[in-house]
Structures are given as structure tokens and as C-alpha cells.
């Protein structure tokens, strides 16, 4: 089993536990909040690079 598969399985398990233990609105706040917080921690050059890569993959 690859490391990526282990991470995915762990993420699904944590997500299911969170969904069971916390209210639905808090679950969705975490699901949206973590990627937004990670994006906001990037500096401007990293954000530009991320947008450029995302646009290039959409235009395939």
C-alpha cells in the first residue's frame, strides 16, 4: 500500500469521526476552513504559481 493511499484512508477515517462527533455546520466549516487557511498562508508568488498551474490544467 502506497503512502498516498494510507493518507487518503486516514483522512476518510478522521472525516467520518468528525462527522459523527461534531455538528454538521462545524464539519463543513472545517472542510472549507482548512484549505482557505492554507491558501492564505502562502505568499503572493506562491499564490500566483498555484493559480497559473490550476488554469493550465483546466485549459487542457
Image (spheres, rainbow, N blue to C red):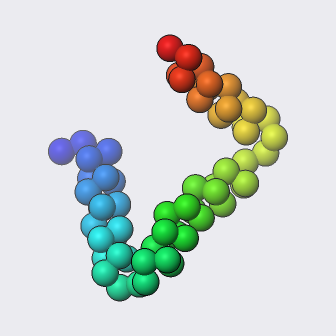
> Residue 48 or 28: which is nearer the viewer?
28
Decide if residue 16 is on the left or right side of residue 29.
left
Residue farthest to the right? 44
Residue farthest to the left? 1
**Residue at the spot x=53%, y=22% of the render?**
57
User: Does residue 53 sit above or below 10 in this rendering?
Assistant: above
Residue farthest to the top? 60
**Residue at the spot x=64%, y=57% of the render?**
36
Decide if residue 1 is on the left or right side of residue 13.
left
The x, y position of residue 19, in whole percent, is 35, 76
User: Does residue 23 sit above or below 55 in this rendering?
Assistant: below
The x, y position of residue 52, in whole percent, is 67, 25
The x, y position of residue 21, in whole percent, is 35, 85
User: Does residue 10 sit above or below 50 in this rendering?
Assistant: below
- Quarter of the picture containing the N terminus is top left
**Residue at the spot x=50%, y=14% of the render?**
60
The x, y position of residue 31, in whole percent, is 49, 63
> Residue 22 or 7: which is nearer the viewer?
22
Amino acid at each position: 500500500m502506497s503512502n498516498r493511499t494510507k493518507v487518503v484512508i486516514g483522512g476518510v477515517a478522521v472525516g467520518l469521526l468528525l462527522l459523527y462527533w461534531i455538528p454538521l455546520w462545524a464539519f463543513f466549516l472545517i472542510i472549507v476552513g482548512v484549505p482557505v487557511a492554507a491558501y492564505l498562508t502562502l505568499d503572493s508568488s506562491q499564490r500566483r504559481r498555484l493559480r497559473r498551474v490550476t488554469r493550465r490544467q483546466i485549459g487542457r
